[in-house]
Image: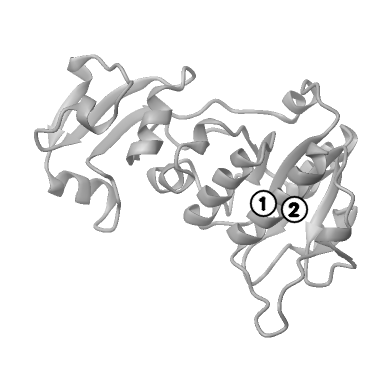
Amino acid sequence: MKNKSDRVWLYGLHACKAAINNDTRILFEVALLGEKSLEKIISDVHVSDHKIKTVDKIWFEKKFGLGAVHQGIAIQVSTRPTYAFEDLEEVPYTNQLVIVLDQVSDPHNVGAIIRSAAAFGANALVMTDRNAPDESGVLAKSASGALELLPIIRCTNLSQAIDKLKKIGFWTFGFAESGTTSLQQADFLGKVALVLGAEGKGMRRLTTENCDFLIRLETSSDFSTLNVSNAAAIALHAVFCQQQT
């Protein structure tokens, strides 16, 4: 499923440069702060002059809010193309890695997870249409350009999505404090789907029951709570290291 609109505004140097250089995107407009030229903000991109406009700080504040770290550039582009589970069947590698998010709704967290997933070679990210962020400037900025690299599969029912992954050969590893196997003990060779739930609530009951294995992250007894994006980065790195051997 696509974003509610076929167009989206992104901001920030890395997010904008990656989107401009993405051949699957259509670039509609570039907004620059003040009298800055595009070449001085981002090198190695080519944009027609008629697509570039000069705006002030108030424009950025109205468009993205006071706290947005826009770095003087924003672009309006087409939303990314949709991906399907069938696309994973065409991946020719024995070892594969997919990350599945169960109602992780904060775009900052999801963006950070996308960045880690791209860094550690994930093949796709799966999340629901509801209770998950749409494609946005916040999401793209948090992903720091990685949004252009990682295929995202949207689904209406996460349990059914996990079943689809199983049918094409994926083993599903859910992360929970009640997990009987530690991250270090798990066997991540082959097709692996890492399933993480929202902070605080964790995975929902049906999601938990549908996982093949429940894995726990071992932490200090003095403080055991991790941000979901940090937990995802640790888990992704563990799978990546095993699958590279």
Instruction: Assess disc 1: are there few (<14), some (14-19) or many (≥20) residues with their C-alpha within 10 Å of its C-alpha.
Output: many
Residue 230 location in percent, x, y? 60, 60
Residue located at (80% from left, 57% from top): 174
Cβ atoms at labels 1 and 2 below 8 Å apart: yes
**Marking on residue 29:** none
Left or right position of 194 against 70: right
Foreground residue, 131 or 48?
48
Q: Work out whether 71 lies above or below 180.
A: above
- Lower position in the chain sequence, tag 1 or tag 2: 1
Q: Which residue is mark 1?
A: 101
Q: Which residue is mark 2?
A: 195
Instruction: Assess disc 2: are there few (<14), some (14-19) or many (≥20) residues with their C-alpha within 10 Å of its C-alpha.
Output: many
Residue 108 location in percent, x, y? 47, 55
Left or right position of 24 against 206: left
Res 235 → quadrant = bottom right
Residue located at (22% from left, 20% from top): 51
CA distance separating discs 1 and 2: 6 Å
Q: What element does badge 1 sit on?
A: strand
Residue 171 location in percent, x, y? 87, 44
Left or right position of 197 against 169: left
